[in-house]
Amino acid sequence: MKLKHICEVCGREEILTPEEAYKAGWDYPPKMGMFGVVSQRTCPQCPINKTVWWKLTVEHKDLSALSDDDKATIERILHEPESILVDT
């Protein structure tokens, strides 16, 4: 199964299988975390401290303090894996 992997920090996008993504260093379900649960969605080059998860759990930001991009990331995560499926 191929999925669209989208780094929430830099915006990088790659279409990979979960195994390919894991081997390449992506932090992405199902190998890292769970679908539908807010956690980091990052490429191999980006840090966790710029993610929505970090803002919510470490910085304790309220949803109202998040950017529109952050809110869109949450929506995408909550609707995974459907929101990142790729037609092959």
Image (tube, grey):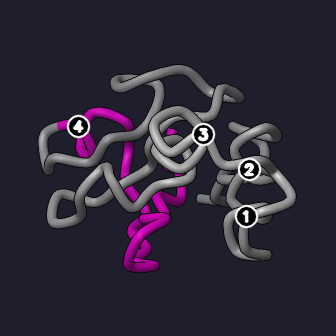
- Residue where numbered disc 2 is placed: 74
Mark 2 and mark 1 lie on one chain; the one further toward the N terminus is 1
Queried whether the magenta region covers residue 12, the answer comes back as yes
Q: Mark 1 is on which residue type?
A: Leu
Frontmost of labels 4 and 3 is 3
Circle on res. 78: none
Q: Is residue 87 left or right of residue 47?
A: right
Asked if the residues shown at circle 2 and circle 1 are in contact, with their CB atoms under 8 angstroms apart, the answer is yes
Q: Is residue 52 left or right of residue 70?
A: left
- Residue where numbered disc 4 is placed: 22
| Number of other residues with Cα within 10 Å of mark 4, as a class: few under 14, some 14 to 19, many 20 or more | some
Distance from Cα at disc 4 to Cα at disc 1 = 28 Å
- Residue where numbered disc 1 is placed: 66
Element class at badge 4: helix
Element class at badge 2: helix
Distance from Cα at disc 1 to Cα at disc 3 = 11 Å
Q: Residue at x 69, y 37 (%)?
A: 81
In the rendered view, tell whether residue 6 sits above or below residue 19. Answer: below
Instruction: Give the x, y percent position of residue 3.
Output: 53, 50
Q: Residue at x 41, y 70 (%)?
A: 9
Circle on res. 60: 3
Mark 4 and mark 3 lie on one chain; the one further toward the N terminus is 4
Mark 4 and mark 1 lie on one chain; the one further toward the N terminus is 4
Asked if the residues shown at circle 2 and circle 4 are in contact, with their CB atoms under 8 angstroms apart, the answer is no
Q: Nearer the viewer, residue 66 or 27?
A: 66
- The magenta stretch is 1-22
Asked if the residues shown at circle 3 and circle 2 are in contact, with their CB atoms under 8 angstroms apart, the answer is no
Q: Nearer the viewer, residue 31 or 45?
A: 45
